[in-house]
Image (tube, rainbow, N blue to C red):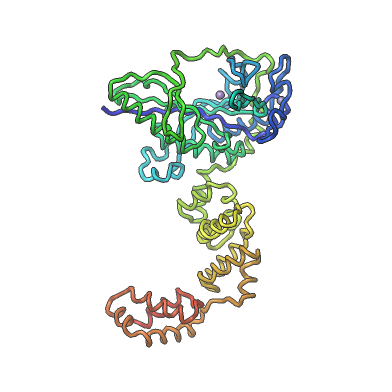
Amino acid sequence: MKYLTAIGLEVHVQLKTRSKMFCGCAVEFGAPPNSLTCPTCLGLPGALPAMNHEALRLTALTGLMLGCDIAPVCNFDRKNYFYPDMPKNYQISQYDLPICENGRVPLHEFAYPKDAQRQIAAPDKKVRLVRIHLEEDVAKSFHFETSTGIDFNRAGTPLMEIVTQPEIHSPEEAFAFLTALKQILRYGAVSDADMEKGQMRCDCNISVRPITQQALGAKIEIKNMNSISGVRRALAYEVERQNAALARGETLRQETRRWDDDAGQTFLMRTKEMAHDYRYFPDPDLLPVKSEGLLDEVRALVPELPGAKRARFIAQYQVSAYDADVLVDDLDLARYFESAAHGARKPKHLANWILNDLQSALTHHGLTIANSPIAPGALDELVNLIHDRRISSTQGKEVFAEMFASGKSAGTIVQEKGIAQLSDTGAIEALCEQVIAAHPKPVADFRGGHAASLNYLKGQVMKLSQGQANPGLVGEILKRKLK
Ligand code: ZN
Ligand code: MN
Protein backbone atom coordinates (compact mmCIF):
# COMPACT_ATOMS: atom_id res chain seq x y z
CA MET A 1 0.00 0.00 0.00
CA LYS A 2 1.24 3.49 -0.88
CA TYR A 3 0.47 6.53 1.26
CA LEU A 4 0.02 10.22 0.54
CA THR A 5 1.26 12.94 2.87
CA ALA A 6 -0.52 16.27 3.30
CA ILE A 7 1.11 18.97 5.39
CA GLY A 8 -0.28 22.37 6.30
CA LEU A 9 1.71 24.95 8.22
CA GLU A 10 0.67 27.71 10.60
CA VAL A 11 3.48 30.19 10.87
CA HIS A 12 3.56 32.93 13.49
CA VAL A 13 5.81 35.84 12.58
CA GLN A 14 6.88 38.66 14.90
CA LEU A 15 6.57 41.98 13.14
CA LYS A 16 9.39 44.50 13.21
CA THR A 17 7.48 47.33 14.83
CA ARG A 18 8.86 49.67 17.47
CA SER A 19 5.83 49.38 19.73
CA LYS A 20 3.28 46.72 20.68
CA MET A 21 0.04 45.85 18.88
CA PHE A 22 -2.43 47.64 21.14
CA CYS A 23 -0.33 49.86 23.42
CA GLY A 24 2.72 52.12 23.21
CA CYS A 25 5.16 49.79 25.05
CA ALA A 26 8.43 49.16 23.21
CA VAL A 27 9.07 45.88 21.40
CA GLU A 28 12.54 44.91 22.46
CA PHE A 29 14.37 41.65 22.97
CA GLY A 30 16.45 41.07 26.09
CA ALA A 31 15.14 43.92 28.30
CA PRO A 32 14.81 43.14 32.07
CA PRO A 33 11.67 41.03 32.74
CA ASN A 34 8.41 42.98 32.94
CA SER A 35 10.08 46.31 32.23
CA LEU A 36 8.13 46.88 28.99
CA THR A 37 4.57 46.76 30.27
CA CYS A 38 1.49 48.89 30.88
CA PRO A 39 -2.09 48.21 32.03
CA THR A 40 -3.13 47.25 28.48
CA CYS A 41 -0.51 44.59 27.79
CA LEU A 42 -0.73 43.31 31.37
CA GLY A 43 -4.43 42.71 30.72
CA LEU A 44 -5.65 44.82 33.64
CA PRO A 45 -9.42 45.37 33.79
CA GLY A 46 -10.64 48.49 32.06
CA ALA A 47 -7.49 49.14 30.02
CA LEU A 48 -8.31 49.95 26.41
CA PRO A 49 -6.44 48.81 23.29
CA ALA A 50 -5.32 51.25 20.59
CA MET A 51 -4.38 49.91 17.16
CA ASN A 52 -0.76 49.93 15.94
CA HIS A 53 -0.90 51.37 12.44
CA GLU A 54 2.57 50.13 11.49
CA ALA A 55 1.60 46.50 12.26
CA LEU A 56 -1.39 46.80 9.92
CA ARG A 57 0.85 48.30 7.28
CA LEU A 58 3.45 45.49 7.53
CA THR A 59 0.74 42.83 7.35
CA ALA A 60 -0.82 44.46 4.29
CA LEU A 61 2.65 44.68 2.74
CA THR A 62 3.17 40.96 3.37
CA GLY A 63 -0.20 40.33 1.74
CA LEU A 64 0.83 42.28 -1.36
CA MET A 65 4.22 40.53 -1.54
CA LEU A 66 2.51 37.13 -1.38
CA GLY A 67 -0.26 37.97 -3.84
CA CYS A 68 -3.07 37.84 -1.27
CA ASP A 69 -6.48 39.43 -1.54
CA ILE A 70 -6.59 42.27 0.96
CA ALA A 71 -9.98 42.57 2.62
CA PRO A 72 -11.64 45.97 2.13
CA VAL A 73 -12.62 45.76 5.81
CA CYS A 74 -11.08 43.55 8.45
CA ASN A 75 -12.05 43.04 12.03
CA PHE A 76 -10.52 42.10 15.38
CA ASP A 77 -12.07 39.45 17.60
CA ARG A 78 -11.58 38.06 21.05
CA LYS A 79 -10.43 34.44 21.13
CA ASN A 80 -11.37 33.23 24.58
CA TYR A 81 -9.31 30.77 26.54
CA PHE A 82 -7.58 30.60 29.89
CA TYR A 83 -3.82 30.56 30.06
CA PRO A 84 -1.50 31.90 32.77
CA ASP A 85 0.51 33.94 30.25
CA MET A 86 -2.64 35.78 29.10
CA PRO A 87 -4.41 37.17 32.15
CA LYS A 88 -7.28 38.93 30.39
CA ASN A 89 -8.34 35.42 29.29
CA TYR A 90 -8.70 36.26 25.64
CA GLN A 91 -6.28 36.93 22.84
CA ILE A 92 -7.12 39.68 20.38
CA SER A 93 -6.99 38.01 16.99
CA GLN A 94 -8.93 37.94 13.74
CA TYR A 95 -11.62 35.37 13.03
CA ASP A 96 -14.00 35.67 10.08
CA LEU A 97 -12.61 38.89 8.58
CA PRO A 98 -8.82 38.51 8.43
CA ILE A 99 -6.76 41.19 6.75
CA CYS A 100 -5.48 38.88 3.94
CA GLU A 101 -6.84 35.81 2.20
CA ASN A 102 -5.42 33.48 -0.47
CA GLY A 103 -1.99 34.26 -1.96
CA ARG A 104 0.96 31.91 -2.39
CA VAL A 105 4.63 31.36 -1.64
CA PRO A 106 6.68 30.26 -4.68
CA LEU A 107 9.29 27.58 -3.95
CA HIS A 108 12.58 27.65 -5.83
CA GLU A 109 15.32 25.06 -6.20
CA PHE A 110 17.77 26.64 -3.79
CA ALA A 111 15.19 26.96 -1.02
CA TYR A 112 15.24 23.17 -0.66
CA PRO A 113 17.78 21.45 1.59
CA LYS A 114 21.07 21.00 -0.31
CA ASP A 115 20.81 17.21 -0.39
CA ALA A 116 17.29 17.38 -1.85
CA GLN A 117 17.89 19.86 -4.66
CA ARG A 118 18.52 17.14 -7.24
CA GLN A 119 15.16 15.43 -6.86
CA ILE A 120 12.51 18.09 -6.51
CA ALA A 121 9.11 16.46 -6.95
CA ALA A 122 7.29 19.58 -8.17
CA PRO A 123 9.64 22.26 -9.56
CA ASP A 124 8.18 25.79 -9.57
CA LYS A 125 5.55 24.79 -7.04
CA LYS A 126 3.63 27.57 -5.35
CA VAL A 127 2.20 26.77 -1.93
CA ARG A 128 -1.19 28.45 -1.64
CA LEU A 129 -2.18 30.28 1.51
CA VAL A 130 -5.52 30.21 3.24
CA ARG A 131 -5.12 33.50 5.09
CA ILE A 132 -2.89 35.90 6.98
CA HIS A 133 -4.25 37.49 10.10
CA LEU A 134 -2.92 39.81 12.74
CA GLU A 135 -2.99 39.12 16.47
CA GLU A 136 -1.13 39.80 19.70
CA ASP A 137 1.53 37.56 21.22
CA VAL A 138 1.20 36.24 24.77
CA ALA A 139 3.66 36.60 27.65
CA LYS A 140 6.52 34.17 28.10
CA SER A 141 6.67 31.60 30.91
CA PHE A 142 9.93 30.56 32.54
CA HIS A 143 9.80 27.36 34.53
CA PHE A 144 12.11 27.23 37.54
CA GLU A 145 12.63 24.35 39.95
CA THR A 146 9.60 24.96 42.13
CA SER A 147 7.90 27.94 40.49
CA THR A 148 7.09 29.58 37.20
CA GLY A 149 7.87 33.18 36.32
CA ILE A 150 6.07 35.15 33.65
CA ASP A 151 7.67 37.92 31.62
CA PHE A 152 5.14 40.27 30.02
CA ASN A 153 7.63 42.07 27.80
CA ARG A 154 6.49 39.88 24.89
CA ALA A 155 2.79 40.16 25.77
CA GLY A 156 0.91 42.21 23.20
CA THR A 157 3.66 42.31 20.58
CA PRO A 158 2.27 42.15 17.03
CA LEU A 159 2.12 38.69 15.55
CA MET A 160 1.17 37.78 12.02
CA GLU A 161 -0.23 34.29 11.47
CA ILE A 162 0.22 32.77 8.02
CA VAL A 163 -1.83 29.65 7.31
CA THR A 164 -1.15 27.44 4.27
CA GLN A 165 -3.40 25.04 2.43
CA PRO A 166 -2.64 21.41 3.35
CA GLU A 167 -0.83 20.94 0.06
CA ILE A 168 2.78 20.52 1.12
CA HIS A 169 3.68 16.93 0.31
CA SER A 170 7.05 16.28 1.90
CA PRO A 171 9.33 17.47 4.71
CA GLU A 172 11.63 18.91 2.04
CA GLU A 173 8.81 21.03 0.61
CA ALA A 174 8.03 22.31 4.11
CA PHE A 175 11.70 23.27 4.47
CA ALA A 176 11.62 25.06 1.11
CA PHE A 177 8.39 26.85 2.03
CA LEU A 178 9.81 28.24 5.29
CA THR A 179 13.10 29.23 3.63
CA ALA A 180 11.33 31.02 0.78
CA LEU A 181 8.87 32.72 3.13
CA LYS A 182 11.63 33.92 5.44
CA GLN A 183 13.48 35.42 2.49
CA ILE A 184 10.43 37.36 1.30
CA LEU A 185 9.67 38.65 4.82
CA ARG A 186 13.24 39.91 5.08
CA TYR A 187 13.02 41.60 1.70
CA GLY A 188 9.98 43.51 2.85
CA ALA A 189 11.69 44.35 6.20
CA VAL A 190 8.55 42.93 7.78
CA SER A 191 10.46 40.64 10.15
CA ASP A 192 13.91 39.12 10.52
CA ALA A 193 12.02 35.82 10.72
CA ASP A 194 14.77 34.03 12.60
CA MET A 195 13.29 30.81 13.98
CA GLU A 196 16.16 30.34 16.44
CA LYS A 197 15.26 33.70 18.01
CA GLY A 198 11.54 32.90 18.09
CA GLN A 199 10.78 35.58 15.50
CA MET A 200 9.17 32.92 13.34
CA ARG A 201 7.40 29.96 14.97
CA CYS A 202 5.81 27.09 13.18
CA ASP A 203 3.13 24.53 13.96
CA CYS A 204 2.76 21.67 11.48
CA ASN A 205 -0.39 19.76 10.69
CA ILE A 206 0.35 16.49 9.02
CA SER A 207 -1.88 13.69 7.84
CA VAL A 208 -1.17 10.54 5.94
CA ARG A 209 -3.68 8.47 4.01
CA PRO A 210 -3.74 5.51 1.61
CA ILE A 211 -3.29 6.66 -1.98
CA THR A 212 -6.75 5.33 -2.82
CA GLN A 213 -8.45 7.52 -0.21
CA GLN A 214 -9.87 10.94 -1.15
CA ALA A 215 -10.44 12.51 2.27
CA LEU A 216 -7.47 13.70 4.31
CA GLY A 217 -6.27 11.39 7.08
CA ALA A 218 -6.38 12.24 10.79
CA LYS A 219 -4.81 15.64 11.44
CA ILE A 220 -1.82 15.39 13.73
CA GLU A 221 -0.30 18.62 14.95
CA ILE A 222 3.35 19.03 15.91
CA LYS A 223 4.39 21.93 18.11
CA ASN A 224 7.61 23.25 19.55
CA MET A 225 9.86 23.59 16.56
CA ASN A 226 12.61 26.18 16.61
CA SER A 227 14.52 25.70 13.39
CA ILE A 228 13.70 25.06 9.76
CA SER A 229 15.83 21.93 9.74
CA GLY A 230 14.02 20.82 12.91
CA VAL A 231 10.71 21.10 11.05
CA ARG A 232 12.10 18.87 8.33
CA ARG A 233 13.34 16.27 10.83
CA ALA A 234 10.09 16.28 12.81
CA LEU A 235 7.99 15.85 9.67
CA ALA A 236 10.24 13.08 8.32
CA TYR A 237 9.83 11.26 11.63
CA GLU A 238 6.05 11.69 11.58
CA VAL A 239 5.61 10.58 7.96
CA GLU A 240 7.44 7.39 8.78
CA ARG A 241 5.66 6.82 12.09
CA GLN A 242 2.22 7.37 10.58
CA ASN A 243 2.94 5.24 7.49
CA ALA A 244 4.11 2.40 9.72
CA ALA A 245 1.03 2.70 11.95
CA LEU A 246 -1.31 2.55 8.94
CA ALA A 247 0.64 -0.38 7.51
CA ARG A 248 0.08 -2.24 10.78
CA GLY A 249 -3.65 -1.64 10.40
CA GLU A 250 -3.88 0.95 13.20
CA THR A 251 -6.27 3.88 13.08
CA LEU A 252 -4.70 7.31 13.56
CA ARG A 253 -6.58 9.85 15.65
CA GLN A 254 -6.41 13.61 15.78
CA GLU A 255 -3.81 14.60 18.35
CA THR A 256 -1.12 17.13 19.26
CA ARG A 257 2.49 16.00 19.54
CA ARG A 258 5.67 17.65 20.71
CA TRP A 259 8.96 17.39 18.82
CA ASP A 260 12.07 16.64 20.87
CA ASP A 261 15.02 17.50 18.67
CA ASP A 262 17.60 15.80 20.90
CA ALA A 263 15.68 12.54 21.05
CA GLY A 264 14.76 12.86 17.36
CA GLN A 265 11.17 11.85 18.18
CA THR A 266 7.71 13.26 18.61
CA PHE A 267 5.77 12.61 21.84
CA LEU A 268 2.03 12.67 22.43
CA MET A 269 0.88 15.82 24.25
CA ARG A 270 -2.88 15.54 24.06
CA THR A 271 -5.59 13.96 21.98
CA LYS A 272 -8.24 16.22 20.55
CA GLU A 273 -11.68 14.70 20.49
CA MET A 274 -13.13 17.85 18.93
CA ALA A 275 -12.03 21.30 17.88
CA HIS A 276 -11.85 23.88 20.68
CA ASP A 277 -14.66 26.35 20.89
CA TYR A 278 -12.96 29.65 21.51
CA ARG A 279 -16.21 31.60 21.46
CA TYR A 280 -14.84 34.22 19.13
CA PHE A 281 -16.72 37.50 19.08
CA PRO A 282 -15.86 40.96 17.72
CA ASP A 283 -13.80 42.96 20.20
CA PRO A 284 -16.12 45.80 21.25
CA ASP A 285 -13.09 48.02 22.04
CA LEU A 286 -11.77 48.00 18.47
CA LEU A 287 -13.37 49.40 15.34
CA PRO A 288 -13.24 47.50 12.04
CA VAL A 289 -10.33 48.60 9.84
CA LYS A 290 -10.78 49.80 6.25
CA SER A 291 -7.80 48.88 4.09
CA GLU A 292 -8.26 51.45 1.32
CA GLY A 293 -5.94 54.16 2.66
CA LEU A 294 -3.59 51.54 4.03
CA LEU A 295 -3.06 49.99 0.61
CA ASP A 296 -2.17 53.31 -0.95
CA GLU A 297 0.58 53.75 1.62
CA VAL A 298 1.87 50.21 1.28
CA ARG A 299 1.93 49.70 -2.50
CA ALA A 300 4.99 51.89 -2.84
CA LEU A 301 6.83 49.75 -0.30
CA VAL A 302 6.63 46.45 -2.21
CA PRO A 303 10.26 45.58 -3.02
CA GLU A 304 11.63 43.59 -5.93
CA LEU A 305 11.14 40.05 -4.64
CA PRO A 306 13.84 37.36 -4.49
CA GLY A 307 12.52 35.43 -7.53
CA ALA A 308 12.47 38.54 -9.73
CA LYS A 309 15.89 39.68 -8.51
CA ARG A 310 17.37 36.23 -9.16
CA ALA A 311 16.04 36.19 -12.73
CA ARG A 312 17.23 39.75 -13.35
CA PHE A 313 20.75 39.06 -12.06
CA ILE A 314 21.04 36.12 -14.45
CA ALA A 315 19.70 38.08 -17.44
CA GLN A 316 21.37 41.42 -16.75
CA TYR A 317 24.73 40.32 -15.37
CA GLN A 318 25.14 36.84 -16.85
CA VAL A 319 25.87 35.26 -13.48
CA SER A 320 25.13 31.56 -13.03
CA ALA A 321 21.85 30.45 -11.48
CA TYR A 322 23.75 29.25 -8.45
CA ASP A 323 25.66 32.51 -7.96
CA ALA A 324 22.49 34.53 -8.45
CA ASP A 325 20.85 32.50 -5.74
CA VAL A 326 23.65 32.96 -3.24
CA LEU A 327 23.73 36.71 -3.96
CA VAL A 328 19.97 37.10 -3.66
CA ASP A 329 19.78 35.07 -0.47
CA ASP A 330 21.35 37.90 1.53
CA LEU A 331 19.91 41.31 0.73
CA ASP A 332 23.10 43.12 1.79
CA LEU A 333 25.14 40.88 -0.48
CA ALA A 334 22.72 41.48 -3.35
CA ARG A 335 23.01 45.25 -2.81
CA TYR A 336 26.81 45.10 -2.69
CA PHE A 337 26.95 43.07 -5.88
CA GLU A 338 24.51 45.33 -7.65
CA SER A 339 26.40 48.50 -6.80
CA ALA A 340 29.68 46.88 -7.93
CA ALA A 341 28.17 45.32 -11.05
CA HIS A 342 26.24 48.37 -12.24
CA GLY A 343 28.11 49.55 -15.30
CA ALA A 344 30.88 46.98 -14.76
CA ARG A 345 32.48 45.32 -17.77
CA LYS A 346 32.83 41.91 -16.17
CA PRO A 347 29.97 41.51 -13.69
CA LYS A 348 30.30 37.73 -13.72
CA HIS A 349 33.95 38.00 -12.60
CA LEU A 350 32.86 40.43 -9.89
CA ALA A 351 30.38 37.87 -8.61
CA ASN A 352 33.20 35.31 -8.41
CA TRP A 353 35.39 37.65 -6.38
CA ILE A 354 32.56 38.55 -4.06
CA LEU A 355 31.39 34.99 -3.47
CA ASN A 356 34.83 33.44 -3.09
CA ASP A 357 37.62 35.76 -1.98
CA LEU A 358 35.62 38.53 -0.35
CA GLN A 359 33.19 36.24 1.46
CA SER A 360 35.94 34.06 2.88
CA ALA A 361 38.04 37.06 3.93
CA LEU A 362 35.01 38.57 5.67
CA THR A 363 34.21 35.32 7.46
CA HIS A 364 37.84 34.95 8.48
CA HIS A 365 37.82 38.42 10.07
CA GLY A 366 34.38 38.08 11.61
CA LEU A 367 32.98 40.82 9.37
CA THR A 368 29.83 41.03 7.28
CA ILE A 369 29.35 42.43 3.80
CA ALA A 370 27.79 45.57 5.31
CA ASN A 371 31.13 46.52 6.89
CA SER A 372 33.43 45.21 4.16
CA PRO A 373 36.73 47.14 4.05
CA ILE A 374 36.61 46.94 0.25
CA ALA A 375 34.00 49.17 -1.36
CA PRO A 376 32.01 47.73 -4.30
CA GLY A 377 33.59 50.14 -6.81
CA ALA A 378 37.11 49.29 -5.62
CA LEU A 379 36.52 45.62 -6.35
CA ASP A 380 35.44 46.47 -9.90
CA GLU A 381 38.73 48.31 -10.41
CA LEU A 382 40.65 45.16 -9.43
CA VAL A 383 38.60 43.00 -11.79
CA ASN A 384 39.31 45.42 -14.63
CA LEU A 385 43.07 45.43 -13.97
CA ILE A 386 43.07 41.65 -14.34
CA HIS A 387 40.78 41.68 -17.34
CA ASP A 388 43.01 44.22 -19.10
CA ARG A 389 45.97 41.94 -18.35
CA ARG A 390 47.69 44.69 -16.39
CA ILE A 391 48.15 42.17 -13.60
CA SER A 392 47.80 38.38 -13.57
CA SER A 393 45.08 36.65 -11.60
CA THR A 394 47.73 35.39 -9.16
CA GLN A 395 48.87 38.97 -8.63
CA GLY A 396 45.22 39.90 -8.31
CA LYS A 397 44.95 37.71 -5.22
CA GLU A 398 47.92 39.48 -3.72
CA VAL A 399 46.46 42.91 -4.50
CA PHE A 400 43.12 41.81 -3.08
CA ALA A 401 44.69 40.78 0.24
CA GLU A 402 46.39 44.16 0.47
CA MET A 403 43.17 45.99 -0.41
CA PHE A 404 41.35 44.09 2.33
CA ALA A 405 44.05 44.85 4.89
CA SER A 406 44.76 48.49 4.04
CA GLY A 407 41.60 49.74 2.34
CA LYS A 408 43.79 51.16 -0.46
CA SER A 409 42.64 50.99 -4.05
CA ALA A 410 43.92 48.32 -6.43
CA GLY A 411 45.52 50.94 -8.69
CA THR A 412 47.45 52.48 -5.80
CA ILE A 413 48.70 49.10 -4.61
CA VAL A 414 49.83 48.05 -8.10
CA GLN A 415 51.71 51.32 -8.43
CA GLU A 416 53.25 51.29 -4.95
CA LYS A 417 54.40 47.70 -5.16
CA GLY A 418 55.50 47.93 -8.77
CA ILE A 419 53.35 44.93 -9.57
CA ALA A 420 52.65 44.69 -13.24
CA GLN A 421 52.13 41.76 -15.41
CA LEU A 422 54.48 40.93 -18.19
CA SER A 423 52.29 41.30 -21.26
CA ASP A 424 55.13 42.25 -23.55
CA THR A 425 54.94 39.64 -26.30
CA GLY A 426 58.60 39.93 -27.22
CA ALA A 427 59.77 39.28 -23.66
CA ILE A 428 57.44 36.30 -23.28
CA GLU A 429 58.57 34.85 -26.58
CA ALA A 430 62.15 34.94 -25.37
CA LEU A 431 61.19 33.10 -22.18
CA CYS A 432 59.25 30.49 -24.16
CA GLU A 433 62.19 29.83 -26.44
CA GLN A 434 64.42 29.41 -23.42
CA VAL A 435 62.07 26.82 -21.90
CA ILE A 436 61.59 24.93 -25.19
CA ALA A 437 65.34 24.62 -25.57
CA ALA A 438 65.81 23.43 -22.00
CA HIS A 439 63.07 20.74 -22.03
CA PRO A 440 63.36 18.60 -25.17
CA LYS A 441 61.41 15.65 -23.76
CA PRO A 442 58.11 17.38 -22.95
CA VAL A 443 58.45 19.28 -26.22
CA ALA A 444 58.72 16.00 -28.12
CA ASP A 445 55.84 14.54 -26.09
CA PHE A 446 53.60 17.49 -26.95
CA ARG A 447 54.45 17.26 -30.61
CA GLY A 448 53.74 13.54 -30.40
CA GLY A 449 50.16 14.28 -29.30
CA HIS A 450 50.51 14.42 -25.50
CA ALA A 451 48.54 17.61 -24.93
CA ALA A 452 49.12 17.75 -21.16
CA SER A 453 52.83 18.43 -21.65
CA LEU A 454 51.91 21.96 -22.64
CA ASN A 455 50.87 22.67 -19.05
CA TYR A 456 54.25 21.55 -17.82
CA LEU A 457 56.03 23.87 -20.24
CA LYS A 458 53.66 26.70 -19.38
CA GLY A 459 54.50 26.20 -15.72
CA GLN A 460 58.20 26.44 -16.51
CA VAL A 461 57.72 29.74 -18.34
CA MET A 462 55.68 31.15 -15.44
CA LYS A 463 58.41 30.08 -13.04
CA LEU A 464 61.07 31.69 -15.15
CA SER A 465 59.07 34.95 -15.23
CA GLN A 466 58.62 34.76 -11.43
CA GLY A 467 54.88 34.63 -11.91
CA GLN A 468 54.79 37.88 -13.80
CA ALA A 469 54.00 36.57 -17.26
CA ASN A 470 50.45 36.69 -18.52
CA PRO A 471 49.44 33.00 -18.45
CA GLY A 472 47.04 33.35 -21.38
CA LEU A 473 49.73 34.83 -23.58
CA VAL A 474 52.26 32.20 -22.51
CA GLY A 475 49.87 29.44 -23.61
CA GLU A 476 49.20 31.09 -26.97
CA ILE A 477 52.88 31.70 -27.73
CA LEU A 478 53.99 28.21 -26.67
CA LYS A 479 51.35 26.59 -28.86
CA ARG A 480 52.37 28.70 -31.80
CA LYS A 481 56.04 27.87 -31.36
CA LEU A 482 55.47 24.12 -30.92
CA LYS A 483 53.38 23.67 -34.08
ZN1 ZN B 1 1.84 47.93 27.09
MN1 MN C 1 -2.26 32.34 16.36
Q: Residue at x 55, y 65 (%)?
A: 383
Q: Quadrant of the N terminus?
A: top left
Q: Quadrant of the C terminus?
A: bottom left
Residue in the foreground of this view, choosing between 215 and 238: 238
User: x, y (%) of residue 51?
Assistant: 69, 24
Q: Is residue 238 above or below residue 393?
A: above
Q: Is residue 8 above or below residue 464?
A: above
Q: Residue at x 54, y 71 (%)?
A: 395
Tell me where residue 474 sits by quadrant: bottom left
User: x, y (%) of residue 227?
Assistant: 50, 37
Tell me where residue 72 sits by quadrant: top right
User: x, y (%) of residue 45?
Assistant: 71, 14
Residue in the foreground of this view, choosing between 201 and 110: 201
In the displayed structure image, the side of residue 271 where residue 66 appears, left or right: right
On the question of residue 249 being in view, the answer is yes
In the displayed structure image, the side of residue 444 where residue 254 appears, left or right: right
User: x, y (%) of residue 293?
Assistant: 67, 28
Q: Residue at x 59, y 23 (%)?
A: 146
Tell me where residue 116 sits by quadrant: top left
Q: Is residue 59 above or below residue 398?
A: above
Q: Is residue 386 above or below residue 54?
A: below
